[in-house]
Amino acid sequence: MLGMPFTRALRLMICGLLAAACAPLSVDQERSLGADFSRDFNRRTVLVRDPAVTRYVSAIGRRLLEHAGPQPFTYRFHVVPKTGINAFAAPAGYIYIYTGTILEARNVSELAGVMAHEIGHVARRHIANNFNRALATNLLHQVGVVAAEITAGPGAADTARALGGLAAMGYLNTFSREAEYEADAFAVQVMFKAGYDPRGLATFFETLKEKKGGRSVPAFLSSHPATSARIANTRRMIEGLPRDARLERHDNGRLEQVQGILRKTAGKHRR
Ligand SMILES: [Zn+2]
């Protein structure tokens, strides 16, 4: 599934890069990687453009980011019209949220939880780390397209990118147990500071756990660490926070309004 065509030149370029594998992906490189992926993905994918939806999601993202400390990246939030419960982070803060995630959220704190978690992966440089890990372990063929772009600039890997860009993103979004815990911890802290009830993260995990018995296992909740362990870990972190009755769970029907719009337009998009 992750296979992609390689030209000899491309392979040579990547081998050249491999020689410099010790140099971690810099913030600048991650920025250009993210911009490239996002431009390409957004051109090829139908995104939800309804301003009521995009503004709503972006506002939640902004509120979280205001409490996330200084960030080297400019975050952007996009809604992908797919029914799966999923979200993923491209390099440099391009966050994609599936409509299925928004529709399954029982309140705004659950949606904010997913978003804060994805921001956490970017903020903690997990995607850059995955890229470096790929270099170090000869897994370059899985992110080779991305590597080719860094060495040769956009355009060099057009054909391969068309076929493999999303697969490479899939690889870059396969996180270790430690990275998942770190993103959860980031989410709990940032949600709390932003005034969202961090229990939303745990309750959304519980929804996902129930769904896991179904036919689709959300990639957002990778198989390790086990869902139950993540729920328990998240709940433990929340217990350590000061009690604050003002933490927001519901937002006066605004989420429900957005869900209504998405349900209405859902018929236009297939999975
Ligand atoms: Zn994650």
Image: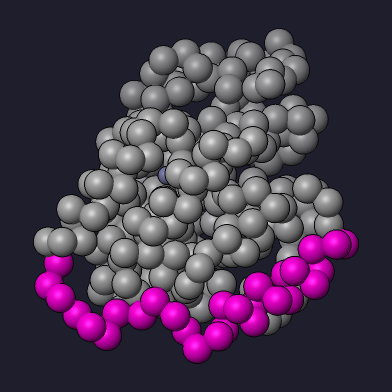
Q: Position of residue 232 (x, y in %)?
A: 25, 47
Residue at left 66%, top 60%? 99
Asked which colour scheme the image uses, the reply is one colour
Residue positioned most to the right: 268
Q: Looking at the image, which residue sits at the far top?
A: 8
- The answer to whether residue 89 is left or right of residue 155 is left
Q: Please give left or right for residue 170 compared with residue 5 in the image.
A: left
Q: Residue furthest bottom?
A: 252
Residue 72 locus on image (x, y percent): 38, 59
Q: Does residue 20 show up? A: no
Residue at figure coordinates x 39%, y 18% from the top left:
136
Residue at image point 59% right, 18% down: 141
Which one is in front, 74 or 85?
A: 85
Magenta region, residue range: 241-268
Task: Choose top left, top right, bottom left or bottom right for residue 199.
Answer: bottom left
**Residue 139, x across and y down, in percent:** 50, 17
Counting labels gives 0
Name the quadrant where ligand 1 sits: top left
Residue 8: x percent and y percent? Answer: 71, 11
Image vertical order of residue 212 relative to residue 90, above or below: above
Q: Where, quadrant-wise, is the N terminus in this rendering? A: top right
The answer to whether residue 243 is magenta is: yes
Q: Against 219, is 87 above or below?
A: below
Residue placed most toward the observer, 52 or 84: 84
Residue shown at the point (80%, 57%) measured from the top left: 46
Horizontal side, residue 21 vs residue 246: left or right:
right
User: Does residue 132 sit above or below 199 in this rendering?
Assistant: above
Whether residue 89 sits left or right of residue 27 in the image: it is right
Residue 176 visible here: yes
